[in-house]
Image (tube, rainbow, N blue to C red):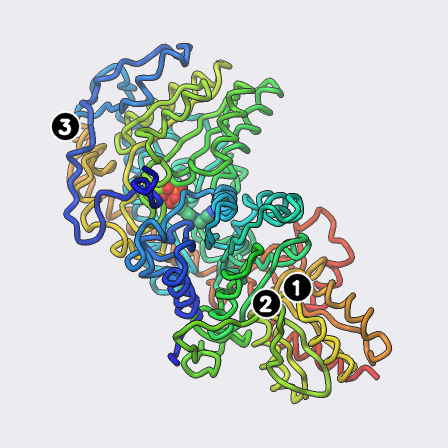
Amino acid sequence: MASSNKGIQVPTPRFRPGDRPNFDHLDVPQAGGLPKPAVDADSQNLKEFAFGLVRVLNHNHCAIGDWDPHLSSGMLLDGLKSMVLTRAYDNRMMKMQRTKRLSFYMKCLGEEAVAIAGAAALRDDDMLFPSYRQQGALIHRGADLVDMMCHCISNSRDNLLGRQLPVHYARKDLNWFSISGNLGTQFPQAVGWGVASRAKGNDAIACSWIGDGTSATGDFHAACTMASTYNAPVILNIVNNQWAISTHESIAAGSAESFAAKAIGYGIPGIRVDGNDFLAVYAVTKWAAERARAGLGPTLIETFTYRGEAHSTSDDPSKYRAQDEWKLWPLGDPVERLKSHLIVNGDWSEAEHDDYEAQCTDEVTKAWKESVSYGTLEDGPHSPVETIFEDVFTEQPWHLRRQRQALGY
Amino acid sequence: MASMTMIQALNNALDLKLTDDPSVVAFGEDVGYFGGVFGVTKGLQEKHGSGRVYDSPINEGAIIAMAMGMAVNGMRPVAEIQFADYIFPGFDQILSELSRIRYRSAGQYTAPVTIRTPCGGGIYGGQTHSMSPEAFFTHIPGLIVMMPSNPYDAKGMLISAMENDDPVIFFEPKRLYNGPFTGDPHVPASSWTKHPKGEVPEGHYTVPIGKADILREGSDVTMVGYGTMVHVALAAAEEAGVDAEIIDLRTIIPYDVDAVTNSVKKTGRCIVLHEAPRTSGFGAELTAQIQEDCFYSLEAPVMRITGWDTPYPHAHEWSYFPGKSRVMQALKTMMETV
Ligand SMILES: Cc1ncc(C[n+]2csc(CCOP(=O)(O)OP(=O)(O)O)c2C)c(N)n1
Ligand SMILES: [Mg+2]
């Protein structure tokens, strides 16, 4: 008997390079199919949301069903514009990395709605604990592109003094936590922030994002445990973009069919949402935010999406995934979908969209020119060299002072 | 003999052991189909199957704990931690479990696990892709800690690690993966093809655990290091015109104390080097041991050349890295001390 069980079983993705991807196996439910529960619903009664998929935009680009957040055309346009600007920013930075002006870069192509609709559904005083792929939320919160670029090229105006790898932004003024390179660490930290907010009698909540791959870390489970124990006002997002570098989501998922369903064991609501549907992400985040703000506890959201580009500038995805997966992704492109919705509503047009795209390209080009005028990674000026010894402690102890002096400063 | 990069040499070592020992498996994040983010396991899944070389979920603690569980059940797992900076979620499993299992079970259970992990800076990796955390692991009784500095050693040392019955943390200086590096970022990268230690036998051989390599014999001063820093030491001594004896420890725990003591007794002077921060770095241990064993032979205080006691910065990484000019300055001071 034992010999028939021999070997180590490891999940394999359906498609690898050379395969023709086909997503027919994905169960993509109709938009509007799921009801919207009351904000104070018992988590025991929410299990269908952990296995379903909340969708608002249908194939005719109309918003339908209970989850339609009925956003004004102004809000929708703001969201679309942030997505288009984020894409233009990403494209520019990627190009600049290819010419070695940045040491590293990470795009969020295809995942713009996850971060931007999420941020749009929150208050500005809600605290964000992002991973490295939510730059859209930072842009939506109004970060100046020049500031973002100056960080990415570690020049004299980098607010992080050249200490961090590009895209690891930190902006306290925008309630944006310092991004860590160590996966998952921000998840339980967000729980702590939320608990402190409530302890102080505030109603600001915390919101964090990790990837599908990162859901395997201990910190994911720690965050769920703590959030459940302390009924924390926090939104925990798992961005399921199907890949963790070269590793298919099935490696983190194992036999589980839903990341959102992990919430059930912790006794917290888990909701799976179409991550490329701006309205759906907005609505689910808003629901979770109202619940948290009312003292009704945490929500785990799985945003179901697709990583449209390489993991980072350090990998070539054609080496590990089938060509055209992104083109064939059945949930489409979040920018195209929101754009079409606005056009169907009569609030936008192809021509306006093209104009706006061109305007964004100009804006990032201008921002880039201004940014490099404050210095470049290669030639500087950077922050003064002696700043590497600052902020290790509040006060510089003798050993750091000696080391600074040894370096000639 | 074939010319190999350090990546190819490590790959070759894994390939040989996967072939000749059915109890060997290699796994970690992106290790399987992709062959690792630096390509060390490239092609091995295709050759040995996805039951021997495979991807793991992102959980360093579980990777190390699973490797230990497999090892106490008779396997010889080689786990990759994608960057040494990410080993810490597995620190408890290493410190409290893996390193002590032989001791606490009085030898009933042993865990022949090899943990491979790229370390070191010089690639603009910022604070989470640049660390050299070897000192933390040298403070743990029961762990072997190794760091090769060239392809020949890398292969022979990795085979020794995999064949050894104790757990090994095997640090791979990523700046050396594709060529030797003398610590000057402005000098164009050279390749292993032009380096004698880039010549690697294709078959099985070992470089013994605990045996240092004297890279250069000399009489003025002893320079002790491992990994990237031995290349920096060689270049600095040459440029400074100092007749240095340069020792590559290769194994950090248990290190070759005789090689160090004999040399320091001969030269009377010693500089220890590492890229990791200074305070409580392995250089502190070496320095203490040298002054205990060689006190009456020393003509000058032992010096440490190290990274600073700060996180590894991004933009200023070359001000952080203990490069050639810092080493030359130290040599000058050392030789002027009478
Ligand atoms: C603790 C830790 N382990 C490993 C890594 C290396 N690493 C960086 S990103 C990544 C994949 C993450 O995938 P996922 O969570 O799905 O996020 P995505 O990149 O898809 O947004 C890995 C393994 C890390 N940064 N931190
Ligand atoms: Mg992912």
Amino acid carrying label 2: it is Ile
Please determine if labels 3 and 2 lie on a single subunit. Answer: no
Q: Residue at x 43, y 17 (%)?
A: A290
Q: Is residue A342 above or below residue B128?
A: above
Q: Is residue A90 visible?
A: no
Q: Do residues under tags 2 and 1 come within 8 Å of each other at their CB atoms? A: yes
* Tag in front: 3 or 1: 1
Question: In front here: A215 or B21?
Answer: B21
Mark 3: amino acid: His
Residue A266 placement (x, y as % from top left): 46, 21
- Mark 2 and mark 1 lie on one chain; the one further toward the N terminus is 2
Choose between A255 and B299: the one closer to the eye.
Answer: A255
**Residue B202 sits in quarter:** bottom left
> Which residue is at 27% across, 22% downward?
A52
Q: Pointer 3: what residue?
A: A59
Do residues under tags 3 and 1 come within 8 Å of each other at their CB atoms?
A: no
Q: CA distance from mark 3 to mark 2?
A: 64 Å
Q: Kindly identify which chain the residue marked by label 3 belongs to.
A: A
- According to the picture, the residue beneath numbered tag 2 turns out to be B209
- Helix, strand, or loop for circle 2? loop
- Give the residue type at disc 1: Pro
Query: Dot 2, how many residues are within 10 Å of its Cα: few (below 14), some (14-19), or many (20+)?
Result: many
The spot of residue A251 in percent (x, y) is 35, 41
Q: Position of residue B71 (x, y in %)?
A: 50, 48
Task: Report x, y in % for residue B93.
Answer: 57, 44
Up/down of A93 relative to A110, above or below: below
Residue A254 is tagged as none
| Distance between mark 2 and mark 1 Cα atoms | 8 Å
Q: Which residue is mark 1?
A: B254
Q: Residue at x 68, y 70 (%)?
A: B305
